Image: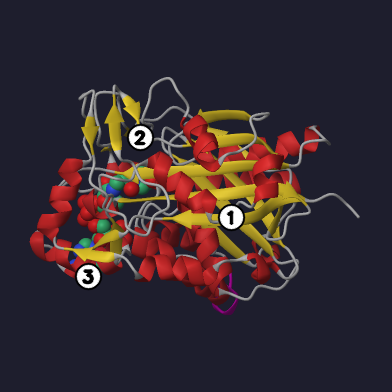
Amino acid sequence: MATIIGIDKIGFYSPEYYLDLTDLATARQVDPAKYKIGIGQDQMAVLPADQDIVTMAANAAAQILDQADRQQIDLLIFATESGIDQSKAAALYLQELLQINHQARAFEIKEACYGATAGLQIAYDHLAAHPTSQKVLVVGADVARYGIATAGEVTQGAGAVALLITRQPRLLGLQQPTAYYSEEIMDFWRPNYRDTALADGKFSTAQYLRFLDLTWQAYRAKTGTQLTDLTAVLFHIPFTKLGLKGLRQLTTDLAAATKESYFDYFQQATGYNRQVGNLYTGSLYLSLLSLLDQQQLAAGSKIGLYSYGSGAVAEFFTAVVQPNYQQTLQVACHQQQLHQRQRLTVAEYEQFFMQTGLTDDHDFQIKRQSPHADFYFAGQTDQRRI
Ligand code: CAA
């Protein structure tokens, strides 16, 4: 049997609080249709003070890891652009919380929303190069913060996606080669002195689409793949309208009847994203989870994935659906997580937003606000996390 390397399990966690974007539109005196149709988002997750990238990542990964996984993981990659420490990798906190094997490399990587894809490709290379290695855990966790009453406010969100990468995976086999492109541009960034991102919004959306064209053309040239070889195409989803623009750009030359199924799959593939908002580096993989949870795909179907991280790096790659993949998904768990969230008023959301700023207090305690979460941030003693 040929060796396949890919995604064996996917875990997902998003905060237990959300804001309905109709409420936000009313508060900001904007037509709700702008947010729901123009931006393509319905709700956004709001981070309480007792969650951060480490606890969200632990909550996502704990869903999927059994005892054997914890012993067999020898590489743990934590992708984030919402780091909590300038030196120590969030991966080490995660390793400890989840009791993952100490004979493992554990580190953090950053390249905006592209980080988890970098992690995924490193995971692939690691398993391809080391026959005795068995499993890699890649986690993407972020908090998308632009600020109250900014243009980006409606495109906020928070959450974590955990991917277990193995040989003979049960969900998706990753294909090589892939196509990637990077170039230094100022479309979105967050200097160390800020806890909210800076974005040249319209420019960033244009770059996302430009990089899509560059990587898709490069992918076609490298592999001879045609769009019609792909059953569905998934996108990094900072907000669903941008993915939709990407799909329109890719499918412009297709006949109307052929186009339709790509748009149907796109609707399925953005269901969770519409409710959670931007997860930054986890967004593409949340879209993948939306598609897998809601659609019965035939084994062998090929899916295209477009990853984009501002700054900027992009990659186009493909993955093949594995037989009986449905048996590995925890659909009820994902849906229950979203259904049991509490809706906040705009005033409460603004209060939550202000709470999660930076502090240099040596000691503090945080009241528990996430009753359903296995892991939560309880504060600091002598500048050490609890
Ligand atoms: N009904 C329906 N649609 C309406 C409407 C109404 N009443 N009013 C406006 N709209 C539509 C507009 O026509 C527009 O649609 P098109 O894009 O199709 O033209 C859309 O709503 C957005 O409206 P604006 O053009 O007025 O845009 P805005 O000033 O509200 O800003 C934004 C939108 C630039 C996305 C802003 O939210 C932003 O800066 N977000 C953060 C940056 C971002 O997410 N960039 C994405 C690429 S970078 C990336 O991908 C990395 C990452 O995750 C950040």
Q: Quadrant of the C terminus?
A: top left
Farthest residue, direction bottom: 257
Residue nearest the viewer, comparing 114 with 51: 51
Residue 129 in the image: state x and y as whole percent: 79, 32
Q: Is residue 7 left or right of residue 19?
A: right
Displayed quadrant of residue 181: top right
Q: Reply above or below: 186 against 50.
A: above
Amino acid under disc 3: Ala
Q: Is residue 169 left or right of residue 359?
A: right
Residue nearest the viewer, comparing 221 with 57: 57
Magenta region includes residue 255: yes
The answer to the question of whether label 3 and label 2 lie on touching residues, with beta carbons closer than 8 A, is: no
Q: Quadrant of the N terminus?
A: bottom right
- Which stretch appears magenta? 254-259
The answer to the question of whether label 1 and label 2 lie on touching residues, with beta carbons closer than 8 A, is: no
Cα–Cα span, label 3 and label 2: 42 Å
Identify the residue at image location x=78%, y=38%.
128
Q: Is residue 148 left or right of residue 228?
A: left
Q: Which residue is mark 2?
A: 386
Residue nearest the viewer, comparing 305 with 98: 98
Residue 24 in the image: state x and y as whole percent: 16, 61
Amino acid under disc 1: Ile
Q: Which residue is mark 1?
A: 64
